[in-house]
Amino acid sequence: MRSSTGSPVMAKLHRLLFLLAALYAGLLPVSAGAANLTVGQPAPPLLLHTLDGQQIATNDLVGNVVIVTFWATWCGPCHEELPLLSDYAAAHAQRGLKVLAFSLDGPDALAEVRAMAGKLSFPVGLLGSAWAGGYGRIWRVPVSFVIGRDGRLVDNGWDDHEPSWTVRRLEQIVTPLLPVKD
């Protein structure tokens, strides 16, 4: 007679538990649908439907450095990152920096999104779903991507172990991409 731990069902269960533990530990990549994002390749196009009814396409911003950022009102690190990013964007707007902010919140949180957006120097819109085209499923926030003036991906947010922006990270990644001040 076979013991319960040696049964085929238990073996499958143990394999499943191992895979789940490996995913949780970060040993296996989580498919975010963004595996095709490659630094140096053309950035996937994205369209921001702003809270004030405008549409801004990343493809229309070629010639500028663009930060595409995903956030949510319920995200603590986003509350810290967005004001810092807003100050940086305002200070560098004349040098061709654009920021597009996509909120993962649903329409039920629109008032809170508007309140936060009112304090920011860049346009904000609701993403509408967790899928962001070629950027994949947005499974963590904050996460950001940087597009160079030539429309190519410069920084892949999925590769960042510390996804929140800091002044140091902005100065290391974004500032060198901007034209020199006159």
Image (cartoon, rainbow, N blue to C red):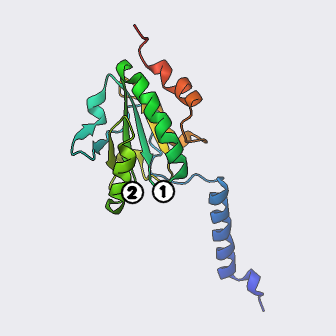
Instruction: Check the image and report above or below for 25 versus 80.
Output: below
Please state which of residues 174 and 111 is positioned toward the viewer in this rendering: 111
Q: Which numbered disc, 1 or 2, marks the residue that appears first in the sequence? A: 1
Q: Amino acid at mark 2?
A: Asp
Q: Residues within 10 Å of mark 2 (few under 14, many from 20)?
A: many
Q: Residue at x 31, y 60 (%)?
A: 107
Indicate the position of residue 164 as horizontal and vertical percent values: 55, 41
Q: Residue furthest left?
A: 53
Q: Residues within 10 Å of mark 1 (few under 14, many from 20)?
A: few
Q: Report, in whole angstroms, how far the alpha carbon at label 1 lies from the one at label 2.
A: 8 Å
Q: Secondary structure at mark 2?
A: loop
Q: Are marks 1 and 2 in contact (CB under 8 Å)?
A: yes
Which residue is labeled 2 in the image? 105
Which residue is labeled 1 in the image? 74
Q: Residue at x 55, y 47 (%)?
A: 77
Instruction: Check the image and report above or below for 56 versus 61.
Output: below
Is residue 134 visible in the rendered image? The answer is no
Indicate the position of residue 108 as horizontal and vertical percent values: 34, 63
Q: Residue furthest bottom?
A: 1
